[in-house]
Structure formats: C-alpha cells, structure tokens
Image (spheres, rainbow, N blue to C red):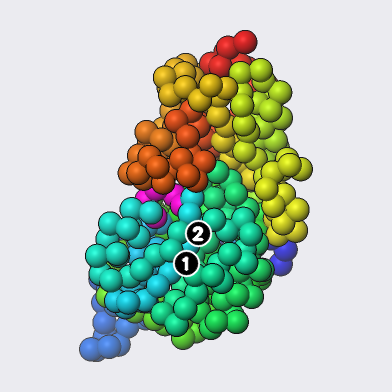
C-alpha cells in the first residue's frame, strides 16, 4: 500500500465480532477467561485493549515500522524511552527542544543520574564530540520546536550505528506523511499523537514505533509496568484522525507556505522560520528527507518587543491563542511565555527563542482568511 491508502487501511481489519469497519470502543477494564490464562488475547486493559491494539497496528503501518505502542501522552512515550536507561548513562539531544521534553530531561531524569548534552545539531557531525562510552541514546526533533531547525536523520543514524547506541526521532511536527525516520535509520520514532495524528484537538496521546523485536519487547514491558497507557475512547479518536492525515497535511503544508511567504514580505516582521525557504538552515536536507515542509511557521517582529508580540497574539481572531498544535484549526502561541516558559531565558535565547517569537500552527481554513487575520493583528 502507498501512504494515502495506509492511513485508512494499514494494519486494519474489520472487527472479528460483527464485522465493524471502524474499530469498536472496547470500554472495559477486564476480559472474561474460560480458565486461568484462557482468554482471547486480552486479559486486563492496562496490558492490552482491542481498540488500542488496532491503533498500535495503524501507527506501525504508517511509519513503516513493525511494532506500535500508544501512551497517555507524548511525554509518557518519551518517559518510556528514558526508562531504557540507567544511572550514569548519557543522552545527546538537540538544544532547541520542546519545553516539556526539556523539563522531563532536566527536572526528572537528571535527578536519577542520567546525563544530557544539549547540542546544536545543524551540523550533525557535532553529535560525535559528545559521545563517549556512557552514551546510550541520541534524541532528535526535526523540525525542531519552535525554531523549525532541520537535522539530518540519515547522518545522525550513521553516527548512532557507528557507536552502537539507540537513535530516537520526535516526528511530531513532520508526521509520517512528510518523513519516515525508521526508513532513514532511526531505531525509535516518537509522536505526540495529540497533534497532527489526532488532528482535531480532542485527545492527548503519545506513540512509539520501532522495527526491532527486542527493543519493542522492552518498551512493551515498560508500557505495561509503568501503566501510562491511553484509554479506548482516545484510541478510537486517534484512529479516526489518522484516516484523514494525508488530506489534512496536504492543506496544512499549502497554507503554511502562503503564511510564511506573506510574513517574509511584511514590513514589521524581522525573521520567519519555515524549512521551505531556500535560505533556511539545512533547507537542502529538508528537501531530501521530507515530502513537504509542514504546517508550522515561527516568526519574530522587528525590535524584538515582548509587549508587541503579546498584542499581536491577543488581536488574532481566526488563529486561536492556545497551547498545542496540529489541529484543523489555526493556533498561535508565544513560546517565551507558554511552551518554553520553563526553559531559562539565557538557554532559550541561545537557541533563538527570543521574546518576540510567535509560533503558528497553520490550520486548514481558507488561506485568504488566515492572511487577513495576520494582517489585521500585526498592522501595517
């Protein structure tokens, strides 16, 4: 199957009980057994649920993986990966991380003796300078949040394989519609399925996809032992969202291109961050590893004035000022005071996340309405 067909049919079969085309919501905590251990594949819903299982098969299919795992949130999925490690192990990560990932790394797992090196990976070879005998994981976001930096997945994968360490990619911004990291050499793909996979701002969920059975078995054990699973209702919503992922992402990309070009020509805007620009760092790598440039755009205003940025996001009418991204509706955020408020100002600004930065999740509304809304909010 090609991708557009996989989103609808990949890993999916009509339900065995009555032939339901959509996976039913098995809203149950436990399953009857004919004798101890005599069950039909499911015994307790933390360990497995038919609706969640259907979603996990779909996730594996669209990422060209073999095993999928669904969690209660994207951070729960990252948490499971980090539980593969032990005190003294080291992680090399990109430096402009999503604020929640940064918080999990530095405020939770550092206290358990995990060492994190936050590195500018625009030149992927910089990773090797931080690898030693204790390094067990390379963690990459690409495009990054909110700078939309592009990291060479193939290049990072070669380094990971050379040193025999795990390589994980947060593929939330790109989605498997635009890029499939497992095919480029990654060991683990992570999604905040809250975002584009669900696509309708109505669920919170995380996902992991892998090819290797031993790694999958370890992660399944952690998923069951730690218990940070998603419920069947959310699994059903994510399955439904995935079925339109391809058509939504096409429109997200088209609208983001129009927004980025509009902002780049606006007299009040200083910088526009969008991987589709030829002068964007690693634009050529984006062209190689991505099918398109995504639905996210970040920008800063001339003068880098905090209050002016706040005024812009408050004046937006079609773009909604809100956390999160990836829904059908357009959202605007102010990273310095929202998603990255927990990152120290010096660290934040070193990564380029300045006070006037605004991050847009460009939805699938009419392009002209989105441009008009930005125009009235920014002013002439």
**Image coords of residue 242 (percent x, y):** 55, 54
Give the residue displayed 55% in from the left and 67% down from the top.
Answer: 127
User: On screen, 248 above or below 72?
Assistant: above
| Residue tagged 1 | 92
Q: Does the residue at mark 2 contact the one at mark 1 (Cβ under 8 Å)?
A: yes
Element at label 1: strand
Give the residue displayed 35% in from the left and 65% down from the top.
Answer: 79
Give the residue displayed 54% in from the left and 56% down from the top.
Answer: 120
- The quadrant holding residue 142 is bottom right
- The quadrant holding residue 226 is bottom left
Residue 334 shows up from this direction = yes
**Image coords of residue 26 (percent x, y):** 35, 62
Q: Which label sits on residue 119?
A: 2
- The quadrant holding residue 207 is bottom left
**Image coords of residue 258 (percent x, y):** 70, 30
Residue span colored magenta = 97-101
Assign the C terminus to one quadrant of the image: top right
């Amino acid at each position: 199957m090609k991708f557009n067909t996989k989103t609808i049919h990949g890993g999916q079969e009509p339900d065995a009980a009555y032939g339901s085309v959509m996976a039913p919501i098995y809203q149950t905590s436990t399953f009857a057994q004919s004798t101890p251990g005599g069950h039909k594949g499911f015994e307790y819903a933390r360990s497995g649920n038919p609706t969640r299982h259907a979603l996990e098969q779909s996730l594996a299919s669209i990422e060209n993986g073999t095993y999928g795992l669904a969690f209660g949130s994207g951070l729960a999925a990252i948490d499971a990966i980090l539980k593969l490690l032990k005190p003294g192990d080291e992680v090399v990560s990109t430096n402009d991380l999503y604020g929640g990932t940064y918080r999990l790394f530095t405020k939770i797992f550092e206290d358990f003796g995990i060492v994190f090196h936050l590195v500018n990976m625009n030149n992927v070879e910089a990773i090797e300078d931080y690898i030693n005998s204790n390094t067990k994981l390379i963690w990459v976001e690409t495009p990054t949040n909110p700078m939309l930096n592009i990291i060479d997945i193939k290049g990072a994968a070669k380094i990971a394989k050379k040193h025999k360490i795990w390589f994980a990619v947060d593929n939330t911004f790109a989605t498997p519609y635009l890029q499939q990291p497992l095919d480029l050499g990654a060991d683990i793909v992570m999604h905040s399925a809250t975002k584009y996979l669900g696509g309708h701002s109505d669920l919170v969920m995380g996902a992991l996809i892998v090819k290797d059975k031993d790694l999958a078995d370890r992660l399944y054990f952690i998923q069951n032992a730690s218990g940070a699973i998603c419920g069947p209702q959310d699994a059903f919503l994510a399955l439904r969202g995935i079925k339109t992922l391809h058509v939504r992402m096409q429109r997200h990309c088209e609208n983001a291109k129009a927004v980025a070009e509009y902002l780049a020509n606006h007299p009040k805007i200083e910088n526009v961050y969008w991987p589709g620009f030829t002068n964007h760092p690693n634009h050529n790598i984006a062209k190689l590893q991505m099918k398109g440039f995504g639905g996210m755009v970040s920008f800063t205003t001339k003068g880098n004035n905090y209050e002016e940025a706040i005024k812009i996001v408050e004046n937006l009418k079609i773009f909604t000022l809100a956390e999160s991204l990836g829904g059908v509706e357009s959202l605007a955020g102010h990273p310095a005071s929202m998603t990255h408020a927990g990152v120290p100002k010096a660290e934040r600004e070193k990564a380029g996340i300045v006070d006037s930065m605004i991050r847009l999740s460009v939805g699938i509304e009419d392009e002209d309405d989105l441009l008009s809304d930005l125009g009235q909010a920014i002013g002439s």
